């Protein structure tokens, strides 16, 4: 059971002690706290107090917390630290986390911080990671790993591994390389322990090992780790030389970030933002999609104006009352269809052709439309509505649902083929387009059946 929890009372208490400069009380209270808890407390404190607390706690714990803190808060803290203080913090971090922190700094400050890092190997590894494009596997790999040469005697292997493991927090895998540092396979700890004393790594290593090249997309690395249940994935160059490894915590971070971005896109927010961002940043993220919605709404106004003559006939005016229902059903069906396709694209499980997917979605929504259309007829009977009127609305609903399903299926597929994020199709884009199509179909079907 967890003994330390971040609560509102705890944060209030920390704030009070910071104001009173009760440093020893703060240190005692946070002595057993996990660095993730420290990060959460820092994020919940006002800026000045967050910086004070960060400087108060020991570097080993704040370094790990620094990697966990959200980017905006981290930048605020780092701005108040000297180059030497930042170097001391990143010196405690794995190379991938250190590169993330330093990579957010202006280029001139990056150079000053790098010059203050005492460990030359750590410094060179961070420089290497900073050279990779942000969306590649190399950008999220860590240089810390355990590797053993193929011809190493088993008697020497454990001592070599022990020396390498001193600077590694979690040992997921032991990799086997040749003299050119090319990845050959992996080593099972069980096989290592049970091997004969006169054996070498060559006698017991496992040649089969999953790996990814450094310039491949991050998403591909995450898919591999998810598919094969990997806790770590080695990263190699074009010649299969071992460069580093991607660990499961990095993969989880990528998945969470992608899910957050897709959720925001689906809600009509074009760039990643948070509730604490400025009004200008929030407006810039939301306004483009609201503008699209406005254009779509104006389009429906002009369409409805084209059927103004319907209002002159008292018996047909009730059609307008069903307009929100038709639009809502089209929007719901479109978002459902697009969400399923986007999920399939994200998980790389779409195997059928576009035509087969469209036919399947059409059949599915045709069935749903017939069921819902039947309920409309039943509803009309309860209200003593003319049967022809109910049949018109019912048929329109069936057609609208079928078409909305096709639009919701094909749009994310087209976006994905063109290199765009298919998550765009799950939000206002689909809703607005389906509103326009549904109103057009509804009134043209009504005009054809009812003859006005």
Image (spheres, rainbow, N blue to C red):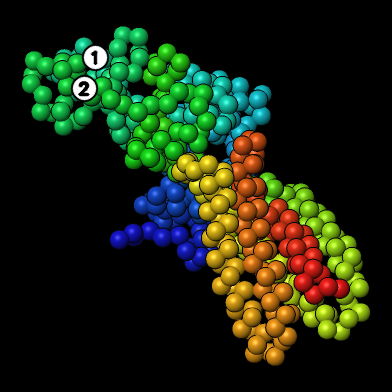
Q: Is residue 106 left or right of residue 292?
A: left
Residue at image x 10%, y 28%? 194
Residue at image x 90%, y 71%? 308
Q: Position of residue 320 (x, y in %)?
A: 80, 76
- Residue 332 is drawn in which quadrant? bottom right
Task: Count the numbered circles shown.
Answer: 2
Label 2, label 1: how many angstroms apart (C-alpha)? 8 Å
Q: Compare marks 2 and 1 and give the one earlier in the sequence.
A: 1
Residue at image x 61%, y 22%? 111
Residue 288 visible in the displayed image = yes
Look at the picture and state if 180 lies above or below 106. Answer: above
- Residue 101 is drawn in which quadrant? top right
* Contact between labelled residues 1 and 2, with CB atoms less than 8 Å apart: yes
> Disc 1 marks which residue?
150
Q: Residue furthest top?
A: 179
> Disc 2 marks which residue?
205
Q: Is residue 194 left or right of residue 84?
A: left
Q: Is residue 439 left or right of residue 114?
A: right
Q: Residues within 10 Å of mark 2 (few under 14, many from 20)?
A: many
């Amino acid at each position: 059971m967890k003994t330390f929890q971040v609560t509102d009372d705890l944060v209030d208490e920390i704030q009070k002690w910071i104001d009173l400069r009760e440093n020893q009380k703060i240190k005692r209270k946070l002595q057993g706290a996990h660095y993730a808890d420290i990060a959460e407390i820092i994020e919940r404190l006002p800026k000045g107090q967050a910086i004070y607390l960060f400087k108060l706690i020991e570097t080993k714990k704040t370094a790990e917390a620094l990697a966990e803190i959200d980017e905006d808060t981290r930048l605020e803290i780092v701005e108040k630290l000297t180059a030497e203080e930042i170097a001391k913090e990143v010196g405690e971090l794995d190379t991938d986390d250190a590169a993330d922190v330093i990579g957010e700094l202006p280029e001139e400050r990056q150079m000053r911080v790098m010059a203050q890092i005492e460990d030359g190997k750590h410094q060179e590894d961070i420089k290497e990671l900073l050279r990779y494009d942000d969306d590649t596997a190399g950008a999220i790999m860590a240089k810390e790993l355990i590797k053993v040469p193929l011809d190493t005697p088993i008697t020497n292997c454990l001592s070599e591994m022990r020396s390498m493991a001193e600077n590694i927090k979690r040992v997921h895998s032991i990799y086997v390389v040749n003299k050119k540092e090319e990845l050959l396979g992996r080593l099972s700890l069980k096989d290592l322990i049970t091997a004969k004393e006169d054996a070498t790594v060559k006698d017991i290593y496992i040649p089969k090992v999953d790996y990814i090249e450094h310039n491949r997309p991050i998403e591909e690395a995450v898919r591999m780790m998810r598919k094969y249940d990997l806790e770590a994935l080695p990263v190699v160059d074009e010649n299969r030389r071992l460069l580093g490894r991607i660990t499961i915590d990095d993969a989880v971070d990528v998945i969470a970030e992608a899910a957050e971005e897709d959720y925001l896109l689906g809600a009509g927010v074009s760039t990643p933002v948070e509730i604490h961002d400025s009004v200008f940043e929030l407006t810039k993220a939301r306004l483009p999609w609201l503008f699209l919605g406005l254009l779509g709404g104006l389009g429906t106004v002009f369409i409805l104006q084209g059927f103004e003559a319907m209002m002159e006939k008292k018996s047909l005016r009730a059609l307008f009352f069903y307009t929100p229902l038709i639009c809502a059903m089209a929007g719901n069906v479109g978002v459902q269809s697009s969400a399923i396709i986007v999920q399939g694209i994200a998980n790389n499980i779409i195997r059928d052709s576009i035509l087969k997917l469209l036919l399947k979605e059409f059949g599915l929504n045709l069935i749903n439309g017939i069921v819902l259309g039947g309920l409309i007829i039943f509803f009309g009977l309860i209200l003593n509505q003319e049967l022809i009127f109910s049949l018109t609305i019912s048929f329109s609903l069936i057609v609208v649902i079928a078409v909305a399903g096709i639009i919701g299926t094909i749009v994310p597929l087209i976006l994905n083929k063109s290199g765009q994020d298919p998550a765009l199709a799950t939000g206002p884009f689909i809703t607005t387009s389906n509103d326009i199509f549904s109103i057009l179909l509804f009134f043209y079907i009504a005009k054809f059946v009812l003859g006005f």
